[in-house]
Image (cartoon, rainbow, N blue to C red):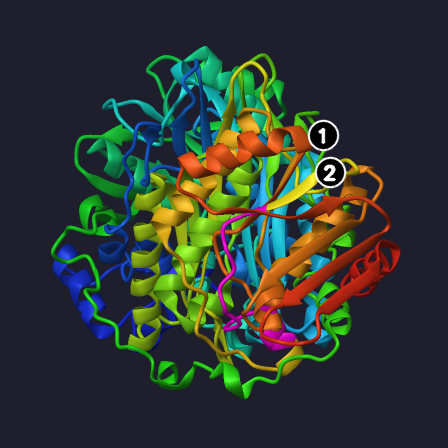
Amino acid sequence: MSKYDRANDLEITPAIIKEHGFKQEEYDNILKILKRPPTYVELGIFSAMWSEHCSYKHSKPTLKKFPHKGKYVIQGPGENAGIIDTGTDMAVAFKIESHNHPSAVEPFQGAATGVGGILRDVFTMGARPIASLNSLRFGSIKSANTHRLLPGVVAGIAFYGNCIGVPTVAGETVFEETYEDNCLVNAMTIGIVEKKKIIKAKASGLGNSVMYIGAMTGRDGIHGATFASAELSEETAENRSSVQVADPFMEKLLLEATLELIDKKVMVGIQDMGAAGLTSSSTEMAFRGNVGMEVDMDKVPQREKGMNAYEIMLSESQERMLLVAKKGKEKEVEKVLNKWGLHAVVIGKIIKKQNIIVKEKGKIVADIPIEPLADSGHPLFPLKHQKGVKPAYLADINIKKSDVKEPDDLEAVLKKLMGCPNIASKSNIWEQYDHMVQTNTVTLPGSDAAVIDVKDRDFMIATSVDCNGRYVYLDPFKGAQIAMAESARNVSCSGAEPVAFTNCLNFGNPEDPEIFWQFEKSVEGLSDAARALKTPVISGNVSFYNEGPAGAIYPTPTVGMVGYITGSEKRYCKQFFRDNNDVILMIGETLEEIGASEYLKELHGLVKGPVPDINMKKEVLIQKTCRDAIKKGFVKSAHDVSKGGLAVALTECCITGTLHGEKPIGAFVELQSDIRLDALLFGETQSRIIVTAAREKVTALKKLASKNNVIISEIGKVGGSRLIINVDWASKKNPKKINLGIDELIDIWSKGVNKYV
């Protein structure tokens, strides 16, 4: 028997109010809105719609700082997914979202349903999904909890993506102790759509039928949105009913049926029943159309006996959509859905009164004005206007370089870094994903960005997801700038112009002023970098309350960048070295910075700043130089310098061709510098890109860099079976050298994480 069986008869007590997550002031506002006590169903609806996950009540004022307009933007934030123009008859839809708490409780189902949900957000816009990405974070690679979570999350992602036939083309996997109790699972999907077929989640047309399509409703996922708006604890972790159950085969049918319905022009609007299920989809669609909606629970297809209105309205069962049919087109909708073996049922209608009205057994069990449920501008909406406080820990987070002993054995440092969890190969993870289905993927996982060809069109799509939470923890503004810059830099290294981004803002409890300060500064940093790069945000997600018993995660504003490679030649680059005797050059310059680096953490056990500096004007010019060089055919490979610094980036250029079926190749590099050796080789100075060029192209490449007022230096040549790095260290008598076999480096790199997966 369901615990909600007597829902409509229950008295609304203080305990029940607390159970639904309301503060007293918020409950008082409900009384003002309704001018009476709420029914149990109404309380549940308010609880879902005013949850952080649905309402963004703590973040909306801050999110207004983002740039969201630009020459490519067709649809910005506020819809299921954002859409950008391509300059052709096609457009690109994309979005990233979190499924952190469900994945921490039920890793397989949590991750799988995260993928399913973001796919639906994209195809409800009329776009066919062509690629998925993910950004994953776990605790220590050696911890028992990571060994529980990692295989389940990866299996869930692989199961859903592989079954539905959408390639998983790129991502990142990070291991830090801060994510031990609260893993992060951020899922992103990209789709393409003919501009004339774009459809939105808007209800209109008085008397039009509201139709339910897809899978039947069960009791899984009840209060999923509320669950995602609370800190993880032993108590919340036991709430497994808040985690949905995935069925990718059903979703494949729903995808094809939805796109066919759009082709037939039988709908006014459509929305995924995602967080808060039927509650959010009905309320949000009605709000966007300035109409009301009446729905009858007795008509909703149910897979479990005895379900009541409360459960049906709040269920987050997967693979379901709500649509508004054009007048007289209901039978056509049913015909299409029947063809695909899915339910298509009229469960309600559009009404003039701007309320959500819920009926059950002929009685009205909920009647709520829509505006205060969905409009953050309504005076009784629980919007929070907060100011953060700079965290106390930032008073003592910077090291003195003089206190860090320089290493004697550079080869030992490089080997340790190549085997550390955040640098070592993750091939055992992404090889579980099908990245070639649909046969559009031209740059596979293992390069800076994935590249997807759009057949029969003169453009390709490049994409990357990035964030260094350690940087953001130590300097939220600068760390967020770097997250944006690196995601764009990865796209530029493929030859694509970054166009727009989506974000998944993962933070702790926003009611903590120090956490909120991290959030504010991160948004400001992302916004500053986005304006410099001319890449507006078009969609995204805020995930708060990412905390466990040990405290909050590192602030992690994940950036998903999308860019275009245009022109009939469709020139693009990969990150690994190609041919013997090619010249190795570095665009940008190295500064004496070791703060916040992987080297400092792995070799010295320190998570300390200062975070590497970044000059966004310089960053823009360096990325432009790289893109222009690729487009003109001057360079054969391009790879940005990030985690582990220059020595690690050079090693990756030598060995990552193996992931693409290429033979590894060595390099001889000579560096001249007066800065510390560890900073030169392992520091993470920003705005640096390693490129290779045939000797005859070097002069033209240098002229291009000079034209853009960018520093470029010859540092070596490609060839052989060893990585040799000579350092002429002007301030010391003895030159230093790294001389390691490529096979040895591959062995270390390939075993670092893969032995745990």
Determine which quarter of the picture holds residue 601: bottom right
State the image coordinates of residue 673 (x, y, percent, origin top left).
57, 64
The amino acid type of the residue labelled 2 equals: Asp
Q: Report the Cα–Cα distance between label 2 and label 1.
A: 6 Å
On the question of residue 290 being in view, the answer is yes
State the image coordinates of residue 745 (x, y, percent, origin top left).
82, 59
Q: In terms of depth relative to the viewer, which is nearer, 283 or 390?
A: 390
State the image coordinates of residue 396 (x, y, percent, origin top left).
40, 86
Do the residues under discs 2 and 1 have CB atoms within 8 angstroms? yes
Q: In terms of depth relative to the viewer, which is nearer, 624 or 172?
A: 624
The answer to whether residue 324 is above or below residue 713 is above
Disc 2 target residue = 434
Give me the residue at 54% from left, 17% from top: 336
- Judged from the image, the secondary structure of the residue bearing numbered disc 1 is loop
On the question of residue 495 being in view, the answer is no
The answer to whether residue 755 is above or below residue 617 is below
